[in-house]
Amino acid sequence: MPGMACGAARGGEAVPRVVAPIVGRDDQFFWDGVAAGEFRVQRCRSCSRLRHPHAPMCGDCGSLEWDAVALSGRGSVASWIVSRHPTEPDAIPRLVALIDLEEGLRAVSNLVDLAPSAVRNDMPVVLTIRDYEGVLLPQFAPAGAGDE
Protein backbone atom coordinates (compact mmCIF):
# COMPACT_ATOMS: atom_id res chain seq x y z
CA MET A 1 0.00 0.00 0.00
CA PRO A 2 1.67 3.21 -1.07
CA GLY A 3 2.36 5.70 1.70
CA MET A 4 1.38 3.32 4.50
CA ALA A 5 3.80 1.92 7.02
CA CYS A 6 3.31 -1.81 7.11
CA GLY A 7 4.22 -4.42 9.65
CA ALA A 8 3.47 -7.75 8.00
CA ALA A 9 1.87 -9.41 5.04
CA ARG A 10 -1.22 -11.60 5.29
CA GLY A 11 -2.57 -13.27 2.22
CA GLY A 12 -0.35 -11.10 0.05
CA GLU A 13 -1.70 -7.85 1.53
CA ALA A 14 0.29 -5.50 3.71
CA VAL A 15 -1.09 -4.97 7.21
CA PRO A 16 -0.55 -1.46 8.63
CA ARG A 17 1.09 -1.19 12.06
CA VAL A 18 -0.95 1.90 12.91
CA VAL A 19 -4.39 2.74 11.58
CA ALA A 20 -5.19 6.43 11.63
CA PRO A 21 -8.49 7.42 13.24
CA ILE A 22 -11.34 8.42 10.98
CA VAL A 23 -12.01 11.92 12.22
CA GLY A 24 -15.55 13.19 11.93
CA ARG A 25 -17.44 16.34 12.81
CA ASP A 26 -18.27 15.01 16.28
CA ASP A 27 -14.68 14.30 17.35
CA GLN A 28 -12.67 16.85 15.36
CA PHE A 29 -12.18 18.89 18.55
CA PHE A 30 -10.51 15.91 20.26
CA TRP A 31 -8.03 15.22 17.45
CA ASP A 32 -7.30 18.94 17.01
CA GLY A 33 -6.41 18.87 20.71
CA VAL A 34 -4.11 15.90 20.24
CA ALA A 35 -2.35 17.76 17.42
CA ALA A 36 -1.94 20.70 19.83
CA GLY A 37 -0.58 18.42 22.60
CA GLU A 38 -3.79 18.48 24.65
CA PHE A 39 -6.41 16.06 25.93
CA ARG A 40 -9.70 17.84 25.15
CA VAL A 41 -13.14 16.87 26.39
CA GLN A 42 -16.61 18.30 26.07
CA ARG A 43 -18.04 20.71 28.64
CA CYS A 44 -21.77 21.32 28.80
CA ARG A 45 -22.53 25.00 28.22
CA SER A 46 -25.61 24.80 30.44
CA CYS A 47 -24.35 23.02 33.57
CA SER A 48 -20.54 22.89 32.98
CA ARG A 49 -20.39 19.07 33.35
CA LEU A 50 -17.30 17.58 31.69
CA ARG A 51 -17.76 14.46 29.59
CA HIS A 52 -15.52 11.88 28.01
CA PRO A 53 -16.05 10.02 25.82
CA HIS A 54 -17.92 12.67 23.91
CA ALA A 55 -21.68 12.47 23.46
CA PRO A 56 -24.27 14.57 21.65
CA MET A 57 -26.21 15.44 24.83
CA CYS A 58 -25.36 16.22 28.44
CA GLY A 59 -26.28 13.30 30.70
CA ASP A 60 -27.08 15.68 33.58
CA CYS A 61 -29.22 18.43 32.07
CA GLY A 62 -29.97 17.21 28.53
CA SER A 63 -28.41 20.23 26.81
CA LEU A 64 -27.10 19.86 23.28
CA GLU A 65 -24.80 22.87 23.71
CA TRP A 66 -21.14 22.24 24.54
CA ASP A 67 -17.64 23.52 24.07
CA ALA A 68 -14.26 21.81 24.24
CA VAL A 69 -11.77 22.29 27.07
CA ALA A 70 -8.25 20.99 27.56
CA LEU A 71 -7.63 18.94 30.68
CA SER A 72 -4.45 19.06 32.76
CA GLY A 73 -3.15 15.79 31.33
CA ARG A 74 -2.51 14.45 34.83
CA GLY A 75 -4.09 11.36 36.32
CA SER A 76 -3.49 7.99 37.91
CA VAL A 77 -3.77 4.37 36.85
CA ALA A 78 -7.06 2.84 38.01
CA SER A 79 -6.53 -0.53 36.36
CA TRP A 80 -4.42 -2.00 33.58
CA ILE A 81 -3.69 -5.06 31.46
CA VAL A 82 -0.87 -6.30 29.27
CA SER A 83 -2.40 -6.71 25.82
CA ARG A 84 -0.77 -9.30 23.59
CA HIS A 85 -1.79 -10.10 20.06
CA PRO A 86 -0.54 -13.44 18.78
CA THR A 87 0.70 -12.16 15.42
CA GLU A 88 2.10 -9.11 13.70
CA PRO A 89 1.63 -6.22 13.67
CA ASP A 90 1.18 -6.34 17.46
CA ALA A 91 4.07 -8.64 18.35
CA ILE A 92 5.14 -6.29 21.16
CA PRO A 93 2.76 -6.28 24.12
CA ARG A 94 0.97 -3.04 24.97
CA LEU A 95 0.02 -1.72 28.37
CA VAL A 96 -3.63 -0.68 28.21
CA ALA A 97 -4.85 1.30 31.19
CA LEU A 98 -7.93 2.89 32.66
CA ILE A 99 -6.78 6.36 33.70
CA ASP A 100 -8.52 8.40 36.40
CA LEU A 101 -7.99 11.94 35.17
CA GLU A 102 -7.40 14.73 37.68
CA GLU A 103 -10.65 16.41 36.64
CA GLY A 104 -12.76 13.39 37.64
CA LEU A 105 -13.17 11.65 34.28
CA ARG A 106 -11.83 8.28 33.16
CA ALA A 107 -10.10 7.44 29.91
CA VAL A 108 -8.74 4.30 28.30
CA SER A 109 -5.25 4.71 26.88
CA ASN A 110 -1.88 3.06 26.55
CA LEU A 111 0.93 3.42 29.07
CA VAL A 112 4.38 4.10 27.65
CA ASP A 113 7.95 4.42 28.93
CA LEU A 114 7.74 1.67 31.55
CA ALA A 115 7.92 -2.10 31.85
CA PRO A 116 4.81 -4.07 32.81
CA SER A 117 6.48 -4.99 36.11
CA ALA A 118 6.68 -1.28 37.00
CA VAL A 119 2.95 -0.52 36.63
CA ARG A 120 0.99 -0.05 39.82
CA ASN A 121 -2.59 0.94 40.46
CA ASP A 122 -2.81 4.56 41.66
CA MET A 123 0.58 5.45 40.13
CA PRO A 124 0.59 9.04 38.82
CA VAL A 125 0.77 9.47 35.06
CA VAL A 126 0.89 12.36 32.60
CA LEU A 127 -0.30 12.80 29.05
CA THR A 128 2.22 12.42 26.27
CA ILE A 129 1.41 12.68 22.59
CA ARG A 130 3.28 10.13 20.51
CA ASP A 131 3.81 9.97 16.77
CA TYR A 132 3.40 6.42 15.52
CA GLU A 133 4.32 6.34 11.85
CA GLY A 134 2.66 9.70 11.23
CA VAL A 135 -0.36 9.09 13.48
CA LEU A 136 -0.51 11.21 16.65
CA LEU A 137 -2.00 9.35 19.62
CA PRO A 138 -2.57 10.38 23.24
CA GLN A 139 -0.72 8.08 25.63
CA PHE A 140 0.19 8.26 29.32
CA ALA A 141 3.65 7.96 30.87
CA PRO A 142 4.80 7.78 34.50
CA ALA A 143 4.78 11.22 36.10
CA GLY A 144 8.27 12.48 36.86
CA ALA A 145 9.31 14.71 39.73
CA GLY A 146 8.79 17.80 37.58
CA ASP A 147 5.37 16.67 36.29
CA GLU A 148 3.50 16.32 39.55
Image: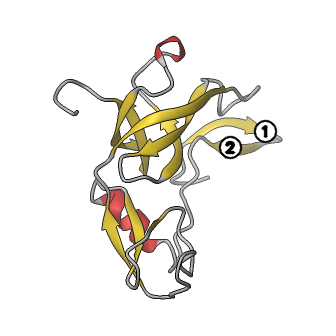
Q: Quadrant of the C terminus?
A: top left
User: In this view, which residue lies farthest toward the bottom?
Assistant: 64
Q: Where is residue 144 in the image (x, y as percent from the top left)?
A: 24, 25
Q: Where is residue 26 in the image (x, y as percent from the top left)?
A: 52, 77
Q: Which amino acid does label 2 sit on?
A: Val
Q: Nearer the viewer, residue 11 or 144?
A: 144
Residue 95 occupies quadrant: top right
Going by the numbered disc 1, the residue's amino acid type is Arg
Q: Mark 1 points at which residue?
A: 10
Residue ranking furthest to the top: 117
Q: Residue at x 61, y 24 (%)?
A: 93
Q: Which residue is rendered at x = 42% and y = 64% of the image?
A: 31
Q: Are marks 2 and 1 in contact (CB under 8 Å)?
A: yes
Q: Is residue 52 left or right of residue 93?
A: left
For the residue carrying disc 1, how many other residues have a C-alpha within 10 Å: few (<14), some (14-19), or many (20+)? few
Q: Residue 132 carries which label?
A: none
Q: Which of 84 and 107 is in front in this view?
A: 107
Instruction: Classify 128 as above or below 27.
Output: above
Above or below, comparing residue 25 to residue 3 in the picture: below
Residue at 46% x, 43% y: name it. 100
Q: Is mark 2 on a helix, strand or loop?
A: strand
Disc 1, SS: strand
Q: Which quadrant of the figure has residue 112?
A: top left
Residue reaching furthest to the right: 11
Decide which of 146, 15 is in the foreground and name it: 146
Q: Which residue lies furthest to the left in this view?
A: 146
What residue did someone put label 2 on?
A: 15
